[in-house]
Amino acid sequence: MGTDFDKTAGKSSEGIPAATIIIFRNCPDGGAPQVLMTIRSRTMAFAGGMAVFPGGRVDPSDFAMAEALVDAGTITLTTEEAAHQIAAIRETLEETGLALGLKGKIDAASAAKARTMLEERNELAPVLDAFDWSLDLEQITPFARWFPKNENIPRVYDTRFYLANLGTGAVDVSIDNSENTHLFWTSAQGALDAADRGEIKLIFPTRRNLERLALFASFDEARAQAEAIPVKTIVPQIDTSSGQPMLTIMEDAGYPITAELLETVARG
């Protein structure tokens, strides 16, 4: 989608490519749908101690796998988009233990074994071969792309967000004991309320995405909006026209709140 990718470094020409899946499940008590969030380890260079959606950077192996699938005609996406979707699937399995975006004979036991193998191999392709699984990219829906460029920050991520649904969500999740310290299910509004109470911390993109997710009464509503609004690269800008510096985003990307006082913005 317009960004050159360096296969060797696993880095785009303008930012580090990354991907994440916003995982929905039905609320056990019948309330608003819940999404899975994680607290990043405070030792992490990016967003340490912050509540975020599971995900991470696109690795060279993700790009290589995508390129092979595109060349074989197995998938019709661009190589770059396929690499991001593969990374989102790999990171989800690695960070949470959930095998999303995959098809085959998948149960809790096989997912746990696959996760262990992934931790050892650090590549998704050999895991799929070992378990006779294949990609099922129809399970995930492109939702957003955020690229908070800042020349003063050396580590800038160009992150694509996807949606997926667990339905009843009657599955176990567990932290990876390296990047994350806590996984939890919450409604989008519940996460915003927890941040307002000081119980969790949210960086600017996560807060804006939670506000957007809070609009939806179901996963189907979220997916319908995502399919109706083309994904655009969101690059926050500082606006000083009102006298108080505001961090703003575009008005037509589906977000109900598009500005926040710069002084209140939490940084990763």
Image (cartoon, rainbow, N blue to C red):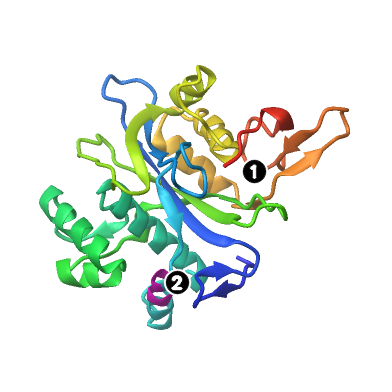
Q: Main secondary structure of the magenta part?
A: helix
Q: Amino acid at mark 2?
A: Thr
Above-or-below relation of 231 to 68? above
Element class at badge 1: loop
Q: Residue furthest bottom?
A: 71
Decide: few, some or many residues near mark 2? Use Cα within 10 Å; few <14, some 14-19, many ≥20.
Answer: few
Above-or-below relation of 110 to 236? below
- 62 inside magenta stretch: yes
The one of 144 and 50 positioned closer to us in this rendering: 50
* Quarter of the image that includes the N terminus: bottom right
Image location of residue 44, percent across then percent down: 46, 48
Above-or-below relation of 161 to 263? below
Image location of residue 113, percent across then percent down: 15, 57
Element class at badge 2: loop
- On the picture, is 233 further left or further right than 18? right
Image location of residue 77, percent across then percent down: 47, 69
Q: Which mark is residue 253?
A: 1
The answer to whether any part of residue 8 appears in the image is: yes
Q: Amino acid at mark 1?
A: Ala
Q: Residue at x 20, y 63 (%)?
A: 117
The answer to whether any part of residue 33 appears in the image is: no
| Residue on which disc 2 sits | 76
First in sequence: mark 1 vs mark 2: 2
Please tell me whether mark 1 or mark 2 is closer to you in this view.
1
- On the picture, is 119 further left or further right than 110? right
- Residues tagged 1 and 2 counted as in contact (Cβ below 8 A): no
**Disc 1/disc 2 C-alpha distance (Å):** 25 Å
Decide: few, some or many residues near mark 1? Use Cα within 10 Å; few <14, some 14-19, many ≥20.
Answer: some
